[in-house]
Image (spheres, grey):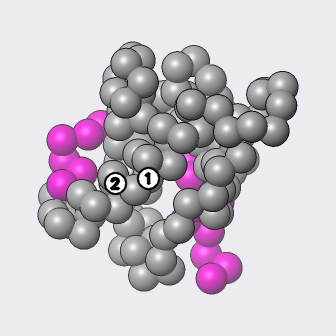
Amino acid sequence: MLRYDMSRDTRKAMAPHARLVQGAIAVLANRQLGGDETPHAIFKTEGGVVVNRREIAIKSDYVIDDFRKDTAPTPEEEAVVAAIQGVQEIWDRDGAAGLAAFSPPEMGDPLRSMFETRW
């Protein structure tokens, strides 16, 4: 499990583009680890991405590989946190236009926890 930080304002601004954000996170995390850059989402209520064939759930303020055997952060979790930071940098620099280079995952649950409306 690794924590990430994203402001409420950034989440609200990104929310209409949540599927593109999800695709961008998947691509950037897999690119960092040399994996398949096709964006894949997972089928979990909170949403998440597939990185190196590992399902990484993205919660409201942390990411977790639900199938890991110990509590140490996995390389996939680290890559997803780095990808979230990378997406935030793209958003801060270019806004929604910066996400145009990415495509959304074709299937899987959306990032419900990241973009929950109970803020």
Residue interval drawn in magenta: 98-119
Q: CA distance from mark 2 to mark 1?
A: 5 Å
* Within-10-Å neighbours for mark 2: few <14, some 14–19, many 20+: many
What is the tally of numbered marks visible in this picture? 2
The residue located at (24%, 58%) in the rendering is 90
The residue located at (34%, 27%) in the rendering is 31
Element class at badge 1: helix
Residue 28 point in image, percent of width and height? 35, 37
- Residue located beneath label 1 in the image: 84
Q: Is residue 38 visible?
A: no
The answer to whether 24 is drawn above or below residue 53 in the figure is below
Q: For the residues labelled 2 and 1, say whether their Cβ atoms are less than 8 Å apart.
A: yes
Residue 114 point in image, percent of width and height? 57, 61
Magenta span: predominant SS is loop
Q: Amino acid at mark 1?
A: Ile
Specify whether 95 is left or right of 42.
left
Is residue 116 rendered magenta in the image?
yes
Specify whether 46 is left or right of 12.
right
Element class at badge 2: helix
Specify whether 67 is left or right of 87.
right
Q: Work out whether residue 23 or residue 7 is closer to the camera in this orientation and state it.
A: 7
Specify whether 110 is left or right of 106.
right
Residue 112 point in image, percent of width and height? 61, 57
Is residue 39 rendered magenta in the image?
no
Q: Work out whether residue 67 or residue 20 is closer to the camera in this orientation and state it.
A: 67
- Residue located beneath label 2 in the image: 87
Q: Is residue 91 visible?
A: yes
The residue located at (63%, 63%) in the rendering is 61
Q: Amino acid at mark 2?
A: Val
* Within-10-Å neighbours for mark 1: few <14, some 14–19, many 20+: many
The residue located at (56%, 52%) in the rendering is 111
